[in-house]
Amino acid sequence: MHRFYGRRCVLKAPAPVLRASCLCGSAPCLLCGCCPSSNNSTVTRLVFSFFLLLGTLVSVIMILPGMETQLRKIPGFCQGGTTIPGIENHVNCDVIVGYKSVYRMCFAMACFFFLFSAIMIRVKSSKDPRATIQNGFWFFKFLILVGITVGAFFIPDGTFHDVWFYFGIVGSFMFILIQLILLIDFAHSWNEVWVRNAEEGNSKCWFSGLLFFTVLHYALAFAAVVLFYLYYTKPDNCAEHKFFISFNLILCVIISVVSILPKVQDASPQSGLLQSSIITLYTMYVTWSAMTNNPNRECNPSLLSLVSNISTTEAMPTSSPGMVQWWDAQGIVGLVIFLFCTFYASIRSSSNAQVNRLMQTEEGKGTVGGEEVGEDGLRRVVDNEEDGVTYNYSFFHFHLLLASLYIMMTLTNWYKPDITTQAMQSTMPAVWVKISSSWLGLGLYLWTLVAPVIFLNRDFN
């Protein structure tokens, strides 16, 4: 028997029956058998993030070599495949099919999260009837996502890809900023915990650890700058790359110096070089990612040509539209950072007030649901949001919407089809979007350092 006592679930049914019934129930019930100490708010974010990761996995599978053979079986999807009466596509499936599949899968995820973002506007506590939709009915949510995905695969080509490409550009720009905010928050939390441990225990060990990782991050960033100058610039060419590398290096030096100024340290004792080193390393990654989208192949050698010491003209002939490199090193690194930030956004509980305002979270506002013990002796989860939500439901879904657009652009390497949709090409807009996001992100981090100094009468702790 499966009974509820208030917001607490007590499990008395066989496991298969439990799992089936909990698919239509609340988040605590969904995972109370395996995560009895989890909060309702945390479990809900993890499950929605799992939906995003599931869609990402499907997108990855769709661009694997050989998948075009299977995707040709979708009616009306590409030239030479099964057709629908009156509809026939005239595109090079060997080049476009992975691109089209990823765009449609991520379009479906974006629509799914936009729907919930609109529904959850201004939900203040779990007493709102809409909170029940947020924290439960997972089976039906999965069916909705599957239904939108199936429909997305039958969208006529037309201008869909061109329009959605620019949606992806804007959404990815915003998500890169969110990633930077999450990394700032992670660095603050990391520094805070290790400093507290150093004050309470073996200070030499903890401070040595902080020093080691700080030096490591700066060393990796410096090595990246050297490699950028060696392989992504030419003595008489690649002026944009020289500017990007030099300017971002100068900005990173500035934020590092500012973070240890006496006035900044007095106003924000939690700031330091560990945070600046992480932001510096991330900035170098974004700079690298931007340079890999430069359509000038002389300034943008492929990783294969670098490793094999082959000239870029031999490694990447521009005359062949079929030479599409879906996977490269910066894309893989981008996926790793994406996975880390998605997981961290689902479990974060930050004490940093500035980051909480930016991320629309209010950790600690909701009622802390202590661990209650059920009749079977197991600890059960209680609702920790009866007095107030711990995160903005609508903004969380908007964040996942942006993540869907970012993963779409990352998996397709920010490529855009040419006018005839017969080839893929890099574009300068993608370069400038990434670079400008790194500048805005560095400016945002600089503001978190100097704001407490400028506005002395405001509490930033």
Image (cartoon, rainbow, N blue to C red):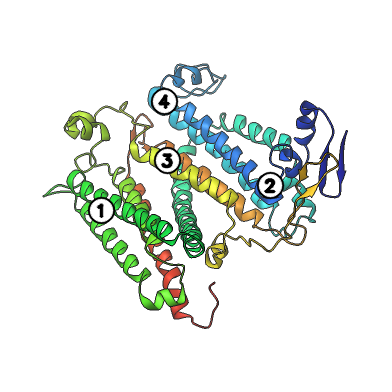
How packed is label 2: few (under 14 Cα within 10 Å), some, or many (20 or more)? many
In the rendered image, residue 272, in percent from the top left (x then y), is placed at 40, 66
49 lies above or below 277: above
How packed is label 4: few (under 14 Cα within 10 Å), some, or many (20 or more)? some
In front of the other: 398 or 12: 12
Give, as a three-letter code, the residue at label 2: Ser
Give the number of the mark in front: 4 or 3. Answer: 3
Nearest to N terminus: mark 1 or mark 2:
2
Give the number of the mark in front: 2 or 3. Answer: 2
The residue carrying mark 3 is 410
Nearest to N terminus: mark 2 or mark 3:
2
In the rendered image, residue 44, in percent from the top left (x then y), is placed at 67, 46
The circle drawn on residue 222 is 1
In the rendered image, residue 342, in percent from the top left (x then y), is placed at 53, 46
Nearest to N terminus: mark 1 or mark 3:
1
Real-space CA distance between mark 1 and mark 3, rounded to the nearest whole angstrom: 25 Å
Nearest to N terminus: mark 4 or mark 3:
4
Q: Residue at x 26, y 35 (%)?
A: 302
Give, as a three-letter code, the residue at label 4: Val
Q: Is residue 359 left or right of residue 220?
A: right
Real-space CA distance between mark 2 and mark 4, rounded to the nearest whole angstrom: 49 Å
Q: Residue at x 35, y 41 (%)?
A: 330
Q: Is residue 35 left or right of residue 207?
A: right
The circle drawn on residue 70 is none
The residue carrying mark 4 is 91
Give, as a three-letter code, the residue at label 1: Phe
The circle drawn on residue 38 is 2
